Amino acid sequence: MNSFMECILEFINYLQIDKKYSSNTIASYESDLNDYQKFMTEFLKKDIYHIEKKDIKLYLKYLKDQNKSPKSISRRISCIRGFYKFLLIEKIIANNPMSTIELPKTKKSLPKVLSIEEVDKLLDIPLTDAFSYRNKAMLELMYATGLRVSELVSLHIHDIDLTSETVRTIGKGSKERIIPIGEIAVHYLKLYLNIYRNELLKKEYTDILFLNNHGKQMTRQGFFKILKKIAKEKEIKTSFSPHTLRHSFATHLLENGADLRSIQELLGHSSISTTGIYTHVSNEELKENYKHHPHGE
């Protein structure tokens, strides 16, 4: 009989090899399942073969008591469901205690979006050294393409084609997409690549596009830190994350006449319904602007 941790390891291997999930998704699944295993074995003294529905309900109550959001709890339920489905298929367990567990109702929140003025302010940074030119190229490329931050920091030099003005990326589900790059982003990418990137290289060569001060791949956390610093310096009050630039890219495209299907392709969404949330963002903007009408209040 497999131990709890061995079952988790087999499932993670399945996600890596068979499902080809991204490293970020794998890390998320592993973290959620390790937390679940710890609760079951340490708090309830249960192994993988003797967990019942009531035990899972106790775990969900524990998550709620930890002030986890409904969205976070839903993600964990989906993860554990997939785990038990795998164990059933592999005939490691005979019964699924998750079969009647429902997802909590979550309120869909609209993504935060920066105004065009705020984006312009964010992108208008003083260019004084290799780091500032790198930051400028990253910000311009992200806003020009709507890349996820994980996609941005994973880019290699050969993923950028400055002749055809496109970027190639591998998104969720290992799906490849080719995205056009605007003239401004191309201009600053050329400056960064041709002049300043070499200054960031250390002894070991790497073809990763965006390098940190150690000459290694920029991390998502590193990029967020840079973004927060620039936003503070620019006195941008809107609370946002790197993903906000992606949301802003999509919303500004829609507001300027792009069709939803094209935006779906650019963002790499598998379903048009996911992209549809940006129509709600634009509608909210319309409602807000309508208040300026003499009879709008």
Image (tube, grey):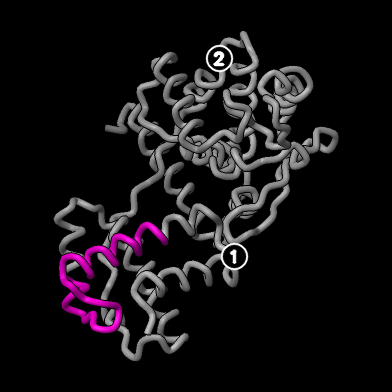
| Quadrant location of the N terminus in the rendered image | bottom left
Q: Nearer the viewer, residue 119 or 82?
A: 82
Amino acid type indicated by mark 2: Ile
Amino acid type indicated by mark 1: Lys
Residue at image point 68% right, 48% down: 169
| Quadrant location of the C terminus in the rendered image | top left
Is there a contact, CB below 8 Å, between mark 1 and mark 2?
no
Q: Is residue 217 above or below residue 86?
A: above
Report x, y in % for residue 77. Answer: 32, 67
Alpha carbons under labels 1 and 2: distance apart: 38 Å
Q: Horizontally, is 16 left or right of 228 in the view?
A: right
Residue at image point 25% right, 65% down: 104
Is 150 in the magenta? no
Q: Horizontally, is 118 left or right of 50 in the view?
A: right
Disc number lying in front (1 or 2): 1
Q: Which residues are magenta?
A: 30-57
Q: Nearer the viewer, residue 253 or 40?
A: 40
Q: Horizontally, is 16 left or right of 73 in the view?
A: right
Residue 20 shows which numbered tag?
1
Residue 125 shows which numbered tag?
2
Instruction: Name the N-terminal-most of marks 1 and 2.
Output: 1
Q: Quadrant of residue 142?
A: top right
Which secondary structure, mark 2? loop
Residue at image point 29% right, 67% down: 37
Which secondary structure, mark 1? loop
